[in-house]
Image: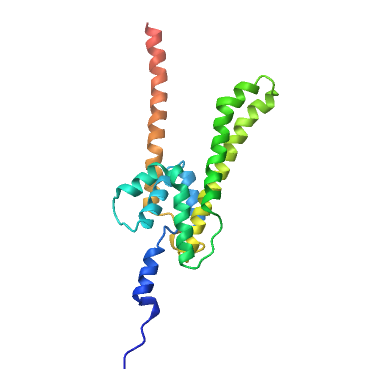
């Protein structure tokens, strides 16, 4: 007598698992890595999402291009995740449009303030408003862009059947290496400035 086929190992289940494979990660790890790497980790995070969405395992041109133009491809990234969630019959929070608006509207507000509004009204504005407005705009930009990334990751976790992302919640040595690499350019620039200023002062003194 033939044994009944296990649905979990059926070809349809296998194809469904592959089609919904996404970059699973806990929100706490995402935020910690983003802060410690000064935001550079989000580049790898974006590339990893596109790599799995494309179903490719290795260096591929299209995921790389999507990563380079990350801000312009967030709409399609979230749209892909939402589509896969619907295939898996999973409800996720947020839409591709809301993610895009949260990412771009604060940035456009900063650009508008710097290019047009401040030049037209800076003389008539109180000094406190003139100084605090750019700071508040930058803070708002950081807040909304972070919320957008969190919603993308939450949607990916829910679609992958790991709402909390616990399977990828620990900081590994590879993550530590990412943080070190992210700080190398800043350390190099700081070292250059520290060494260059005394040298310029000494050369000026000699002349």
x and y percent of residue 164 in the render? 51, 62
Residue 174 placement, left or right of 79: left
Q: Is residue 174 visible?
A: yes
Lateral position of residue 188 relative to residue 83, left or right: left
* Residue at figure coordinates x 41%, y 24% from the top left: 193
Most foreground residue, 21 or 27: 21
In x, y percent, where is residue 83? 46, 60
Taking 114 as reference, is 81 above or below it? below
Q: How many marks?
A: 0
Taking the view exactly as shown, the residue that stands out farthest to the left is 59
Left or right placement of residue 90 versus residue 4 in this view: right
Extreme residue toward the bottom, this view: 1
Residue 156 seen in this snapshot: no
On the image, the x and y values in percent for residue 148 come to 53, 49
The residue located at (33%, 48%) in the rendering is 62
Up/down of 195 relative to 155, above or below: above
Q: Is residue 164 above or below residue 13?
A: above
Q: How is the image coloured?
A: rainbow
Q: Residue at x 37, y 73 (%)?
A: 12
Using residue 156 as the reference point, say whether residue 120 is left or right of it: right
Q: From the top left corner, tell me how far across and down residue 32 is, in percent.
A: 49, 49
Residue lying furthest top in this view?
207
Instruction: Locate the C terminus and report the quarter of the image it occupies.
Output: top left
- Nearer to me, 171 or 39: 39
Quadrant containing the N terminus in the rendered view: bottom left
Q: Residue at x 36, y 87 (%)?
A: 4
């Amino acid at each position: 007598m033939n044994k009944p086929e296990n649905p979990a190992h059926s070809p349809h289940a296998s194809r469904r698992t592959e089609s919904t494979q996404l970059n699973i990660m806990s929100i706490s790890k995402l935020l910690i890595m983003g802060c410690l790497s000064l935001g550079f980790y989000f580049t790898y995070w974006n590339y990893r999402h596109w790599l799995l969405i494309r179903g490719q395992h290795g260096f591929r041109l299209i995921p790389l291009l999507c990563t380079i133009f990350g801000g312009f491809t967030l709409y399609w990234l979230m749209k892909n995740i939402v589509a896969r969630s619907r295939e898996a019959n999973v409800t996720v929070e947020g839409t591709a449009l809301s993610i895009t608006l949260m990412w771009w509207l604060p940035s456009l507000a900063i650009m508008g303030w710097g290019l047009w509004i401040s030049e037209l009204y800076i003389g008539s504005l109180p000094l406190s408003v003139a100084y605090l407005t750019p700071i508040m705009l930058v803070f708002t930009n950081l807040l909304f862009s972070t919320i957008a990334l969190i919603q993308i990751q939450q949607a990916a976790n829910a679609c992958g059947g790991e709402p909390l992302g616990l399977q990828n919640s620990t900081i590994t040595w590879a993550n530590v290496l990412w943080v070190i690499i992210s700080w190398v350019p800043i350390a190099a620039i700081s070292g250059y400035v520290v060494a260059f200023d005394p040298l310029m002062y000494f050369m000026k003194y000699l002349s």
